[in-house]
Amino acid sequence: MKKRILGALFAAGVAAAAAPSRAADLTICAWGTITGPDALVNGMAYGTRDYFEFLNQFRGGIAGNKVNTLLLDGRYKLDEELKIYRRCVDQENAVYVNGWSTGSVNALKDQIGGDGVPFMTDSFASQVLDPEKLPYIFMAGPTYEQQMIIALRDLKQKGGKRVVLMHADNEYGRGPVSVVRQSGIIPKLGLELVDTVEFRYDAQDLTGQLLRVKSRNPDMVYIQSSAPQALVTLRDAAKVGLPARLFIGNMYDISPTIPEQLGPAAEGFRAIQIYAQFGEEIPAMKDIEAFKAKNKIAKEDIYYMKGWLQGTAMSAAIGNAIQKSGGKVPSDLKAFRKLVRDEMEALRDVNTGGITPPLNYADHQGSTQARIAEIKDGKYAVAGEWIDAR
């Protein structure tokens, strides 16, 4: 059964001209790093917005209701993201909110529950994944820790032993590394953690840190960071004689910018791939191409596919909630939000058009499967089958 959707999204730093809300309108409010240090991966913000615009243009919205779209720029600044959240909940009356950073969702987790508003986080932090204690927070894939464990298992399978963990000096960097270290999974796998190296999130030179890594003679270096930091890491690794094949990152380290800027120095770098790449021959691309024929797509990358997928899940829950309300948008926003939350958790076997395996939101993750991608001849190529991260 085809799931439908509704929403309102981000506007690069500015509100995307949302019309005054009518009683029957559906609003989804979202923000991303449209400008700022994490802008390389902001395709997901545009992907979610575009999915809802696709529904407006090709499906008449959700259950006959046009989607109000609001796109805001959090600039990867915590105070800005917190202000945007309150605007989305209190002023825009969004039925669903889509937020960006690990720091913001962790700071907001109690407010989200108190406000009773469904929240799709772009973070994969395990500390905000708890269906019982945090029943309104959802994500779209394996946690950062689960992604790291996939890499560790792959190292063991290939006969490696010595591991270095590199991470940024923020919550997004420290949190997952700390959880994995404390879990004991590394020695349980028969591996040895030979060093943990922290670096400034906005560092432009990591030569010193990479010399330290080289001295540890690792078989694998896992980078808990995003594409901009992976770019600096791999550039400086090449300076000190460390090959890219030693390094693997999470799903936010898949960016065409890396091989484009580094060329041969990026060959062999690997990252966890949760979503199909933009342009793959999958059913979802037919809808995306139809949308592209009439609209400009800002970022044609894997993160755009993540945003499109998130829109698919969010809209499925909203559409089901409207159906359970007799085909009409409930006038009681609080009750509507609660119903959407319940329907989100009830989603099973949602067809994503091949972006991921079918979604199941009983655990609030949608899917816990991923693949490993490797840079070959200047492009990321899938290096294996889907692996369940649990």
Image (tube, rainbow, N blue to C red):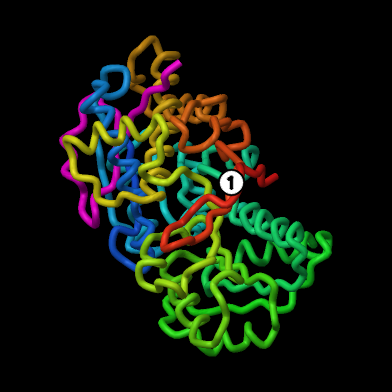
Residues rendered magenta in the picture = 1-27
Against 86, residue 233 (above or below) is: below
Against 104, residue 386 (above or below) is: above
Q: Quadrant of residue 79?
A: bottom left
The residue identified by callout 1 is: 370
Q: Examine the rendering and report whether any part of residue 24 can be seen.
A: no
Q: Residue 42, percent across and down? A: 35, 55
Q: Which quarter of the figure is the C terminus placed in?
A: top right
Against 330, residue 68 (above or below) is: below
In the image, 165 versus 276, the foreground residue is 276
Q: Residue 185, percent across and down? A: 78, 59
Crowd tier of the residue under label 1, counting other residues whose Cα lies within 10 Å: few below 14, some 14–19, many 20 or above? many
The residue drawn where x is 42% and y is 37% is 309
The residue drawn where x is 65% and y is 38% is 132
Q: Describe residue 149's horizontal placement relative to residue 4 as left or right.
A: right
Q: Residue 38, percent across and down? A: 38, 64
In the image, 318 versus 50, the foreground residue is 50
In magenta segment, residue 290: no
In magenta segment, residue 23: yes
Helix, strand, or loop for circle 1?
strand
Against 170, residue 200 (above or below) is: below
